[in-house]
Image (cartoon, helix red, strand yellow):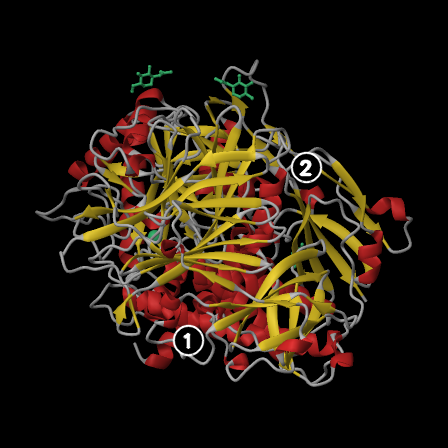
Amino acid sequence: MTYLGRIFLLTIILVVFLKHSKAVCGYESCPATKANMVNIHLVPHSHNDVGWLKTVDQSYYGYKNAIHHAGVQYILDNVVSELIKDPNRRFIQVETAYFAKWWKVQSETMKKVVTKLVNEGRFEFTGGAWSMNDEADVNYQGVIDQFTVGLKFLNETFGACARPRVGWQIDTFGHSREQASIFAHMGYDGQFFSRMDHNDKDTRLNNLTMEMIWDTSESMSGVNLFSGMLYNFYSDTPGFCFDVLCTDEPIIDGKSNENNVKERIDGFISYAKEMSEHYLTNHIMVPMGGDFQYEDARVNYKNMDKLIKYINERQTSGSAYNIFYSTPSCYLNSLHQSLQSWPNKTQDFFPYAHERNSFWAGFFTSRPTQKRFERDGNHMLQVVKQLSVFANLTSEQQNKDLEYLRQIMGVMQHHDAITGTERQAVSDDYDRLMYDAIVGASNNARDALRILTNMPNGEFESCLRLNISECAFTKDGADNVVVTLFNPLAHTSSQYVRIPVKEENYQVIDEKGNQVPSEVVPVARQVLALEYRPNDTQHELVFKATANKIASYYIKKVVSSESNLTSSIKKISPREIDESETVVENSLVKLVIENKTGRLKLVEMNGVSEKIVQNFGVYKTNTSCAYTFRQDGDIQILEDDFEFTVYEGALVKEVHQQVNEWISQVIRIYEGVNRVEFEWMVGPIPIDDQLGSEFVTNFKSGISSNGVFYTDSNGRELMKRERNLREDFVSDLSRQPVSGNFYPVTSRIALQDDNKRMVLLNDRSQGGASLEDGRRHLFNDGGGVGEPLNETQYGKGLIARGKLYLVLDSVKEGDTVKEREAEKELFLPFFKFFSRTSDLEKATTKTIPDFNELPQSVHLLTLESFTENEILLRFENFLDISEGKLISFNIRDIFDSLGGIAIRETTLDGNMPLNEMKRFKFHAQESGNMPSVVEYSTAQHKSLEAENSDEASMFTVSLYPMQIRTFIIKTE
Ligand SMILES: *[C@@H]1O[C@H](CO)[C@@H](O)[C@H](O)[C@H]1NC(C)=O
Ligand SMILES: *[C@@H]1O[C@H](CO)[C@@H](O)[C@H](O)[C@H]1NC(C)=O
Ligand SMILES: *[C@@H]1O[C@H](CO)[C@@H](O)[C@H](O)[C@H]1NC(C)=O
Ligand SMILES: [Zn+2]
């Protein structure tokens, strides 16, 4: 056929296709099933990692296929043209990052075709976030944001028919309860996954508990999510992978010596039979696909068509197997309609061991600097979102820059991004993307601050290397510098601020013209020694700042005598003193350092005194990798004495420790701050012995916690962990007693006895455990493995720097409230912007909305522009059921100050009116009689809906412990 002829024919097909329309999507479009048969839901899907062995763009464009065959654009092209051919065919699309990229370059006709497929339920979005996010290392804010971005794109592009009904977390390396809770609050009906500890899975297969009702919150009652575990892995149904990437036999049904229909159909039916014996209903789901499959979708569909045809043909001769194209949501719909009772689940699915001796606990820590960079990106994102609303930034470039950072942060949540399980070149590309996105967004921050402060020409530079005390803006001195602080939290906060400076005398002056106490502290010499660090500044100016939303501090160089509020730092070299220990204390915290060993030995704070010894150690390993942490022997504690020096000022006191050639640390206490800061620096980890190293620090205390400890779930609720114990099964820990007891720590790990409680907070996700009869508190800290994870930077082995925070407290009700507050402040601290000015008067700020009236436990989780005249707002009660209670407050003033004319409440993702949420309700085993009809659940509270003409009482918001509520404010 000629080229033109082909185009003509295609046009006819498309026109015919577009004409015929029965626009029914969602559950109404699900295929018919047969009550008296085993119904096999065949689910075509392709698993498209948003970066892994290849970068996002390489995977999308099908570039560098020698590394890994992956070309997402072709997958989408070809799937769509196969779907058109037969209305029974289905496909699920998961990663919106890829779909959006593809959609942007489609013709109008193609867009119409796809829209029709979506509206008829044939092309169905499942999961639907920007990426399939990890569940161990992510913070809930990043997850909620990236679902918001993905679902918003789908809603804006297709409307309600594109709204996903089920989660599809099939490749994530273990599953968090918070993720399940987030799905429930977005109105999802259920989720599916396919990785689970092998002992857990075996038990569940035996007990018919592969599918369950997950109680997703201790604090919020009745927030359940149906969660199902796939029978086999998500890819390559054994013997029936018809993809061109596989080598399984096609179905040969012609008059041929090779005809294999009988044998192939027998094989599939026996697989289905075996599988159905492990599930409760007469429905089973068989995923058909795998990593980057369906690039030549014709091959897949042609063979699946035959599979369906020949299996169903046997029904006339008595076979009880019924097979059809389906989707996970249609499968879930069948389960819901089957009126079954399901087992319960309350804990989470960490750590994940895919086989004996193989706990996936390495990725809790892999690529520690990238894990921190992700936090920096989130910090910038939240700051710029708020600033853009306050300053009403609306230019095309500003919207584009902000949206780009939102999307890149969505990419970073992917289960091969924040996890550190991607190839080095891919990791470099993530860094590049994030850097570009942060720089773009920082232009918005500058634009906003020029409007919101009285410095219309301020530079508002954000220095991105403050973690090594470097800032191009202050390299020649900080004279006449204004540092403008932005506080992303709801309430006014006081925090210490550090600015790289030369060793000179400075005055710090607040907006009212008052001088603020400050001091100049030396930077740790190990930081100064970093080869890639320009050594213009060797000190940091420290002062305590207070900011409601925006506050500016003016810094001026002075000769020493003028600066009577500047305290001087005293240097003490303890070994020269003939004492056995050195005491470093302020009004709240006392530290005792043992002079001989240089180690911390005792901490006193909050009326509690406890021996706490901190050590560093290494697990040598031959077999760890980016995913797994495998010990080959016991921990080797670094026994040598530490060198140390103490610097004492009135505001801050620091112990600078040299642990060995490649580990150093600063222990720090600030006046008025009830915690101890440990700023560690590790690297390059020696690899001369050709072994990998899992590097850890442990805090050994006398607190006898009986093997019980607590770790946070994605920065929210605490999960109780019991050494060597799992909720539903017996874990095989014989060969990996350490890694099998490691849990993800995204923000906090705690242990306690009847009287005392010890808590560590961190600045990025890590792994943590309590291993020795409650007495040892071990914290995996920036582990790097020799090969193949061998990170380098600036041509040398990676050096990582980060912070841990220790809190010691008594065990009293409500004491953990302080930890929650600290967690928020450490996660979203003041963002610093630098400008140069000689005129102090100009540093005052304009008025912006005030959130201080909100109860103390309310977190301003989100404030961002949503559409042109809409603002998305989320409030969270960040205390849990043991710490807080129902709170109520009125947001009329906030609504008015944001220029609101109407407000409505939505599901957690912001894209569906809350009063339209209607979720499947599943019946739990042993919870009374099974109802005779299917049940649904709706939101547990009445949606807030009001207009500016309504009275203020309409604007009352109540929040249960841990509850988040999401609102859209319509503005002029
Ligand atoms: C679940 O299976 C395990 C072994 O696989 C068995 O010991 C246990 O009794 C089963 N539990 C139930 C409730 O059937
Ligand atoms: C979703 O899209 C529909 C139609 O495009 C729109 O009316 C609705 O407001 C959107 N949902 C939200 C929460 O914005
Ligand atoms: C499952 O949870 C429900 C609701 O909390 C409860 O009523 C039921 O007894 C539980 N079932 C089992 C088997 O524990
Ligand atoms: Zn994957």
Q: Which residue is at a point 24% across and 41% down the rendered structure image?
A: 635
Rounded to the nearest whole Å, what is the CA distance between mark 2 and mark 1?
A: 51 Å
Residue 186 appears in the figure: no
Q: Amino acid at mark 1?
A: Phe
Q: Position of residue 665 (x, y in %)?
A: 39, 56
Residue occupied by mark 1: 8
Of residues 802 and 591, which is closer to you in this image? 591
Q: Quadrant of the N terminus?
A: bottom left
Structural crowding at the residue carrying mark 2, measured as other residues with C-alpha within 10 Å and reported as few (<14), some (14–19) or many (≥20) = some
| Residue 488 drawn above or below residue 941 | below
Q: Amino acid at mark 2?
A: Ala
Secondary structure under the numbered disc 1 in the rendered image: helix
Q: Position of residue 123 (x, y in %)?
A: 46, 54
Residue occupied by mark 2: 939
Q: Position of residue 62 (x, y in %)?
A: 30, 69
Q: Position of residue 522 (x, y in %)?
A: 47, 68
Between circles 2 and 1, the one closer to the viewer is 2
Please tell me in which quarter of the rendered image ligand 1 is found.
top left
Of residues 635 and 658, which is closer to you in this image? 658
Secondary structure under the numbered disc 2 in the rendered image: loop
Q: Which residue is at a point 66% across and 77% down the rendered structure image?
A: 561
